[in-house]
Structures are given as C-alpha cells and as structure tokens.
Image (cartoon, helix red, strand yellow):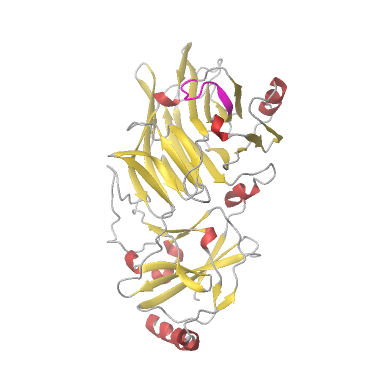
Amino acid sequence: MRRAAALAAALLGLAAAARGEVTQAEPCTLDRPEGAVVVTGERLEAALGAPLDRLRLYALRDGALRPIPYQLDERTPEGGYAFTGGEERRSDTDDGLLDPNDELVFMARHVGGRLGDWAPLPGEVERLALHVTTADRDRGGWVYLLLFDGPAPPRAPDDLVSLTWSGPDVTGWAGTRHKVVSAPSTAGFLDWRELRFARPGGGWGPDVLDRLKVGLEARYLFLDIARREDEMRSHVVGFVDGPVRVIARVVGETYLIWGHWVRTTPRTQVVIYEDRVELDLEVRIPVALEPGARSALRIALDFAPEAGDLAVWTDTLRRPLRPGRTTGRERREAQARPPTWVCASSREGSLLLRLEPGPEAARLPRALHLEDGPAPDPPEDVPGSLLCAGFQLDLTGLLPGTYRARFVLQLGPPLQPGAEARLLLPDAAPLVVEVGEP
C-alpha cells in the first residue's frame, strides 16, 4: 500500500520532477520566531514501528524541499526519557523504533509552504504532512516526515543547542541564540555565572548576568537558616543532547539542619532550547517550618554592568525600572503587586522569567523580588545588585512533603514594554498540529 501510494504520487509529480522543480500549493503564513513544536509518536501512525534512523524531516523553503533540524526523543515504557549520556544512561526497549510515546521535536520558525506536485525522493516509501497552525487556524505552515526503505539522506547540519564540557564536567550550554556558563565545579549546574547573547554577525556579546540568585531563608525550631546558590549542589546525571533541545535530569540538594537535607526527586529535569530554558523542579522538604516566622525561597536574575541600559518590567508594572534610578516608593509599589512574569531587556537581548508553582504550592504567596543598590548580596562577582529581579515564594509554616514548581526562562531580541507578547506566545497561544497525507 505504501509503495503504491508513493508510485501514484510520483506519477502526479512527474512533470515537475522532470523539470527539477518543486511546486508550492500554499505559502507559509506562520510567523513564530520563538517556540518549539512537539508531536508524540502516537500521532505519526503511518511511521510507527519505523527505524528512527530511516526518518527525516523536511520543509519547503526558498523554493526547495530542504531538511530541517529535528530530533526524535525516545521514552521508556515507564515514561522517562531514554538518556543517551550520563551515569543514568538508559535505552528504550524497542531497538530504535518509533514508539507511541516517543517525541518528534522541531522549531516553529523552520516550517515552510505546502507542497503542490511532488515526487518521492530516492528510497522514500512514506510521507506524512504535518500542518502547524495557530489555534484559530488563521496562520500555518507545513513540515514533512519522510520514511526511507534504506539509508536516509543526510540530516540538516544545524545543531541549535548543546551542552558544553570541560573534560568530564558539564559547564553549561551554548546555542544559536544564547550561551550560559555554570559554576566551575561538578556540582553547580544550576549555579549560573554567565549569560551571553549571540550576535548576528557571529560570536557572543558581553556577559549580561552576574549570577542566577537562588536563596532559601527558613525558620525552624526558633533557628534562622540561610542557604545560597553556592551552597546548593546540582549536577547532571543523565541527558539527551540533540540538535534541537537538551534534556537533562538534574540531582540537587542543600543541607538544612541537624542531618536534614532538602533534595530533589527523580522528576527534576531541565529542558533547553535555543530560545528557552525550562526547569521542572520537585523537592522534598523534610521538616515543618515555623508558622510564626517568615521563610522564603527566591529565584532571581542579578544583572551585570555589561547589560548596559537595562529595563525591567512585569505584567503588574508596565513602567520599566532602570538600574540605579529606582526609588524606594517604586520598589514598594512594584512588590505590592505579585507578577506572573518578569521581563528584562538590554541592548543585547531580552529575558522573560515565569514561576509556575505546582498544585501543592499553588496557594503559597509570591511576590516580586527586586534589589537595586550597592548593598552586598554574596555570592557575587560584581558587588551590589544591578536590578536583581525575579520571584519570592513565601514558605512560612510549610509542612513536610514533596513540592513542585516550574521555572521558564524565555529569551529573545531587545524589547520595549508591550512587545514581550512574542516571548509569551509559545505558552499563551500554543500551536496546533494536524497530521495527514501530503
């Protein structure tokens, strides 16, 4: 049946193929510079059971059918990712075949037009059309998943993001749009020390980040506890480093008091794209915190002077704050209105940070964390705070248990207030995928 369908398509497209042309039935109207598209294997029914190394993804771009960056991430029967590296490296049980729970991933910006007349490529035996549209079907584009009966053509050469290494240690990651450098140790993957944006002409811009600030202040049995990012150990134990995204399982812990540790569970992982970082965090709190004294968790971006003319605003604070020019009144007003996102923009690029507490922590009060001034806030490479902005989560009276939260950092070009909608689109208006025949 597959070969018959391919033969029929070949006859229909014979004239165009003879001329060496590819015809376009409809142009691509989707304009999504940010965001990825993820399609589960169960939706790629015609390709289920196919060897992964015989599948390729194409798009009609610039008048030709071209390979685009993609990856097929295998998942185990238990639902976890089949890591290809790290001490928890594990394979799926299907001998490299496409399963219903596997995931096809590509970037929305790589979709193309719809093919008109077409002929199969040499060795092609199956072709699936994936129509990627906005929810209202107003704009869309197409990609094509091709199955070959032998060795597949070369993949697109682009590697959009990958882990960086120093010997056996992961030291961060780099991609087509940004680069992050973590602490120089085997236990500091989440202790970010540098963030640079890629420049259009090549190379990297200045380091706009002093530190990623992660801090815990807690009150337990009338004792004050303070833990900072350099006292929290985190390292990668398993990973997938593909051409479109990095998936890494991270183990983290920090000592609390009297033999008690705060530790992550196996559900904690980081997913990194060229324009986005997602941290799904699940931790076990071993003790009950005092109900009558404040405890809090903060996660914030402390910017470096090299960020230049920085502006910070939120969904509840539309007038941007600028380093060295925020008054006490402005800070109090900003902190009185809890935000759902915080956006910062410099001449190099923009970052939008979101905090999404899980169901166990959804009722915990949160606030804007904001510091701007010369007061020390160790550990730091640059003394003081240059608009250190992010979130505080109130943990007062927290009971022992397992808690989840999700942190999402979206990266983009320099923006003005109001233009952050492009960074919110991947989550606010997710794309829809329809799978069918060409």
Left or right of residue 80: residue 405: right
Chain part drawn in magenta = 378-387
| 184 relative to 246, above or below | above
Q: Residue furthest front?
A: 201
| 75 relative to 5, above or below | above
Q: How far from the left and from the top, in percent, is residue 213?
A: 50, 28
Q: Quadrant of residue 266?
A: top left
Name the residue located 28 percent from the left edge and 49 percent from the top edge. 90
Left or right of residue 311: residue 61: left
Q: Residue furthest top?
A: 222
Of residues 88 and 12, the one drawn nearer to the viewer in this rendering: 12
Residue 200 belongs to magenta span = no
Q: How far from the left and from the top, in percent, is residue 391?
A: 57, 31
Residue 102 visible in the shown view: no
Name the residue located 51 percent from the left edge and 62 percent from the top edge. 110
Q: How far from the left and from the top, in percent, is residue 66?
A: 46, 69
Q: Quadrant of residue 322?
A: top right
| 303 relative to 6, above or below | above
Left or right of residue 4: residue 33: right
Magenta span: chief secondary structure: loop
Name the residue located 36 percent from the left edge and 50 percent from the top edge. 241
Give the quadrant of the N terminus.
bottom left
Of residues 352 and 65, the one drawn nearer to the viewer in this rendering: 65
Total residue callouts: 0
